[in-house]
Image (spheres, rainbow, N blue to C red):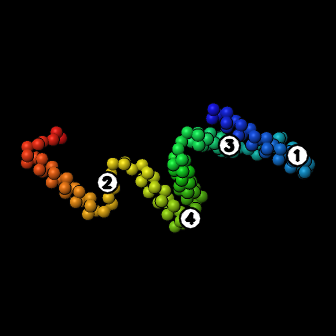
Amino acid sequence: TLYWQNMQLYGFGTLFNAARLTYDDIQNPNGGFWLFDLTAGYNYITWLIVINFSFSGLFISWIQKYANTIVKVYATSSAMMVTAFLSIFFFDLEPTLQLFLGIAIVCISILLYFMPGDLPTSTSLAAATSSSNKLSALNDDDEELGHTKAR
């Protein structure tokens, strides 16, 4: 299952990180053992961040397992867009032209992807109006012949 795969992934990550921290403690014996100082200095904001990242990891693994590729790309792009907007407001990030162009491209791409497929493929205004005129002429002919449509 997905949860077993996450356990394996995070378990091996924890083992390798613990091995590296232990190696660093052996090289520098003055600092103390890492296991006793693991959460030193944590406050409630730090714990909220840890909890947020743990649930984010589970959510991302769910997307990677069950969603198709285009949803993964749009999820990543949308997350970057939201992060950029929040960074502007919370961290006084000065937006650049590249940021606005990237946001515009992501928004247009999402709109195009989720646009209904039954829209006309022609992009010219003349073709759209001429087909509209032809359609209204056909409707007028039907009414002249006595054909009525239920509206």
Give the CA distance from mark 2 to mark 1: 69 Å
What percent of the width, then of the height, locates residue 81?
Answer: 53, 55
Looking at marks 3 and 2 on the same chain, the residue that comes earlier in the sequence is marked by 3
What percent of the width, then of the height, locates residue 98?
Answer: 53, 65
As drawn, the label of residue 32 is: 1
- Badge 3 element: helix
- Badge 1 element: loop
Label 2 belongs to which residue? 120
Mark 1 vs 4: CB contact within 8 A: no
User: Amino acid under label 3?
Assistant: Val
Label 3 belongs to which residue? 50
Give the CA distance from mark 4 to mark 3: 28 Å
Quarter occupied by residue 50:
top right
Label 4 belongs to which residue? 94
User: Amino acid under label 2?
Assistant: Pro
As drawn, the label of residue 4 is: none
Tell us which disc is closer to us: 2 or 4: 2
